[in-house]
Amino acid sequence: MQHVLVLNASYEPLNVCSVRRAYVLVYKGKAEVVERLERPLRSASGSFIWPHVIRLLHYVRVPRMIQRKISRRALFARDGWRCAYCGSSSGRLTLDHVVPRSKGGESVWENVVTACAPCNLRKGDRTLEQAGMQLRTVPRPPAPVLFIQLAAPRIPQRWTPYLATA
């Protein structure tokens, strides 16, 4: 499936959508084509511009306080597919709560990290201090661009200028 990058009115990357959805947004006057592919988009009754990057005409306010749901794939990608404790990328990766849920830890981006199975087993149901372990980096919510990279398996070269500013 061909993906189209969706930008806010301020050129901030928002999401990725299908070519069909992008064309509908352009046709209804809700977006404009910023980048197009050289080949036309054909239908039974004609040919049209094939959108590659579109920009919404009206700014969409994206609340920063609303965090995206944590998924293992997004968590592992945020942590570079490496254990947050030992840095290993081999073996089975798991999700670990820095402050265990049994001790009041929440399932929020700032409290979950990628851990290899041995480190997760070693830490168990203890705090970092109790387990004598340290994090390599402080867990933070991922950048919005991460979700675009996960939605589109291959990032086209022509999207790079729009994603670099985010």
Image (cartoon, grey):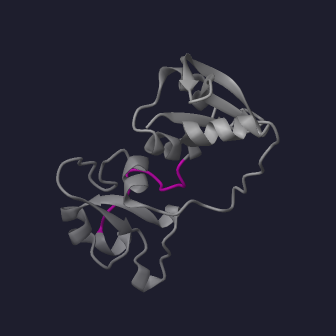
Hey, which quadrant is residue 125 in on the image?
Answer: bottom left
Q: Is the magenta stretch mostly helix, strand or loop?
A: loop
At a point 58% along the width and 28% down the height, the residue shown is 164
* Viewer-nearest residue: 16 or 49: 49
Q: Quadrant of the N terminus?
A: top left
How many numbered marks does the figure carry?
0
At a point 69% along the width and 26% down the height, the residue shown is 33
In the displayed structure, 31 sits above or below 137; it is above
At a point 47% along the width and 34% down the height, the residue shown is 2
Q: Give the range drawn in magenta.
A: 132-142
Q: In which quarter of the image is the C terminus?
A: top right
8 relative to 96 in the view: left or right? right
Instruction: Residue 136: say if magenta.
Output: yes
Instruction: Residue 37: say if magenta.
Output: no
Hey, which quadrant is residue 47 in on the image?
Answer: top right
Percent coordinates x, y for residue 56 in the rendering? 75, 38
Percent coordinates x, y for residue 50 in the rendering? 59, 25
* Viewer-nearest residue: 108 or 19: 19
Percent coordinates x, y for residue 151 in the rendering? 47, 44
140 relative to 100 in the view: left or right? right
* Viewer-nearest residue: 50 or 53: 50
